[in-house]
Image (spheres, rainbow, N blue to C red):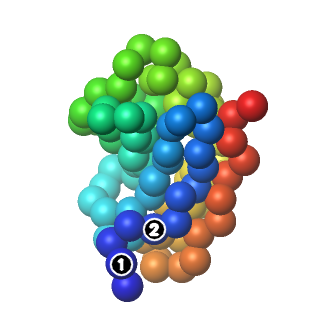
């Protein structure tokens, strides 16, 4: 089984990833160009890395709208279950 799980979402050049076998606390990875950040699911705080301010704002807006879905995706990834994608920000 690969370490990187399915892409939960892509929008405006931003890719959101959840990894199987990843460490707590629950979080997701956001990539934009050469930038990437880990964002906590519970509090939406950047845990590591960085994104340009506009991209980070879009990621936080998306994560706020899909908070419960992100929790479910994290739980499924932790159990090595197939992941479903989450609707992109439009």
Q: Nearer the viewer, residue 66 or 88?
A: 88
- Quarter occupied by the C terminus: top right
The quadrant where residue 21 appears:
bottom left
Q: Please state the total of marks drawn on the protein image.
A: 2
Q: Which residue is mark 2?
A: 5
For residue 37, the mark is none
Q: Nearer the viewer, residue 32 or 18?
A: 32
- Quarter occupied by the N terminus: bottom left
Does 17 appear above or below 58?
below
Which residue is drawn at the image coordinates 30% and 35% (left, top)? 34
Does 56 appear above or below 34?
above
In the image, farthest residue toward the top: 53
For residue 2, the mark is 1
Q: Measuring from the top left, give residue 28's x and y in whole percent.
A: 43, 48
Q: Measuring from the top left, give residue 83's x and y in whole percent.
A: 59, 69
Q: Is residue 75 visible?
A: no
In the image: residue 87, left or right of residue 36: right
Which residue is drawn at the image coordinates 42% and 41% (left, top)? 30
User: How many C-alpha atoms fall within 10 Å of the one at disc 1: few (<14), some, or many (≥20)?
Assistant: few
Q: Rounded to the nearest whole Å, what is the CA distance between mark 1 and mark 2? A: 7 Å
Which residue is drawn at the image coordinates 58% and 55% (left, top)? 8
Which residue is drawn at the image coordinates 38% and 19% (left, top)? 52
Q: Nearer the viewer, residue 84 or 14?
A: 14
In the image: residue 17, left or right of residue 73: left
In the image: residue 10, left or right of residue 37: right
The kind of secondary structure element at disc 2 is: loop
Q: Is residue 80 visible?
A: yes
User: How many C-alpha atoms fall within 10 Å of the one at disc 2: few (<14), some, or many (≥20)?
Assistant: some
Mark 1 and mark 2 residues within 8 Å of each other at the beta carbon: yes
The kind of secondary structure element at disc 1 is: loop
């Amino acid at each position: 089984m690969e370490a990187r799980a399915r892409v939960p979402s892509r929008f405006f050049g931003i890719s959101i990833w959840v990894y199987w076998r990843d460490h707590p606390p629950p979080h997701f990875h956001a990539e934009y160009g050469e930038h990437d950040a880990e964002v906590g699911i519970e509090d939406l705080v950047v845990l590591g890395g960085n994104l340009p301010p506009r991209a980070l704002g879009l990621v936080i807006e998306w994560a706020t709208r899909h908070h419960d879905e992100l929790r479910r995706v994290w739980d499924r990834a932790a159990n090595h279950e197939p992941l479903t994608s989450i609707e992109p920000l439009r």
